[in-house]
Amino acid sequence: MPSPTPLVVMPGTGSDADYCERAFGPAARAAGLPLIALEPGGDLVTDYLSALDDASRSGPVLAGGFSIGAAVATTWALRAGPQRCAGVWAVLPPWSGTPVRSPAAASATVTADALERDGLDATIAAMAADSPPWLADELARSWSRLYPGLIGQLRAAAALVGPTVDELAQLRVPLAVVVSDDDPIHPRAVGEQWAAAAERSAVRSTTLDAWVREPALLGRLARDAWTEAAG
């Protein structure tokens, strides 16, 4: 009997493997998929791509992620092809192509600037003053874990050229896209654009309030969309 297909997932900018475990772990376990949640490293994008290459040496893997993790997963899937990739779980894609005018890229750059200028404690305090309590608590936890490497990770994410619409049209594996109706950092239109461009895709939508209260909802929606796209 072949081994179950692993699901390799990458967090969003400033987040970590702990959040990926909470967002994707329950859905992966329910589907019988071993979960590999990657921790952001010093060379963010290169490290993620290398980890996906390593994980797929013994057979195809599912590649997934949140925000910038979704962009890296899809970029890798385009390169790897069906021989090494069984599909993509793209949760809240941040942008297509260049990050110019992207709210997510702008936010990452502003945070990196603040960390370099003001330090970790002051940046966390300023973020918490302008953020809902759930976001302040989550980012304070992950930023404290990732700093000082977090600065380079934020800059690498903000500079990433994501998959273009033309490239997405060449994707030959099932693409699951999860969008949020009211998340200003991850516009719903971006995810819908990704899904419309891909040959085999399905979309599920949620709201900011719903996935904030229950991160595992994101994984369930991605699993359901992937099941439909793989149909």
Image (cartoon, grey):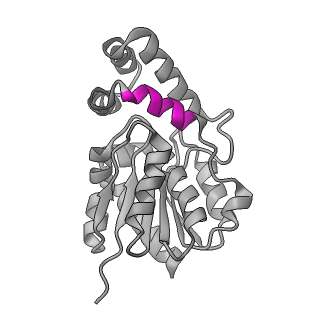
* Residue in the picture at 53% in, 74% down: 229
Residue bounds of the magenta highlight: 149-158
Q: Depth check: give the residue in front, 9 or 137.
A: 9
Tell how many labels. Answer: 0
Q: Depth check: give the residue in front, 105 or 195.
A: 105
Instruction: Confirm whether the magenta stretch covers residue 146.
Output: no
* Residue in the picture at 32% in, 31% down: 146
* Residue in the picture at 35% in, 32% down: 135
Residue that extends furthest to the right in the rendered view of this protein:
166
Q: Quadrant of the N terminus?
A: bottom left
**Residue 99 falls left or right of residue 137:** right
Instruction: Confirm whether the magenta stretch covers residue 156.
Output: yes
Q: Main secondary structure of the magenta part?
A: helix
* Residue in the picture at 56% in, 34% down: 158
Residue 174 sits above or below residue 207 on the image: below
Residue 43 appearing in the image: yes
**Residue 160 falls left or right of residue 23:** right
Q: Position of residue 99 (x, y in %)?
A: 64, 38
Q: Position of residue 94 (x, y in %)?
A: 56, 44
Residue 206 appearing in the image: no
Residue 201 sits above or below residue 161 on the image: below
Residue 74, located in which quarter of the rendered image? bottom right
Residue 60 sits above or below residue 168 on the image: below
Residue 60, located in which quarter of the rendered image? bottom left
Q: Position of residue 226 (x, y in %)?
A: 47, 71
Residue 19 sits above or below residue 54 on the image: above
Q: Position of residue 23 (x, y in %)?
A: 32, 53
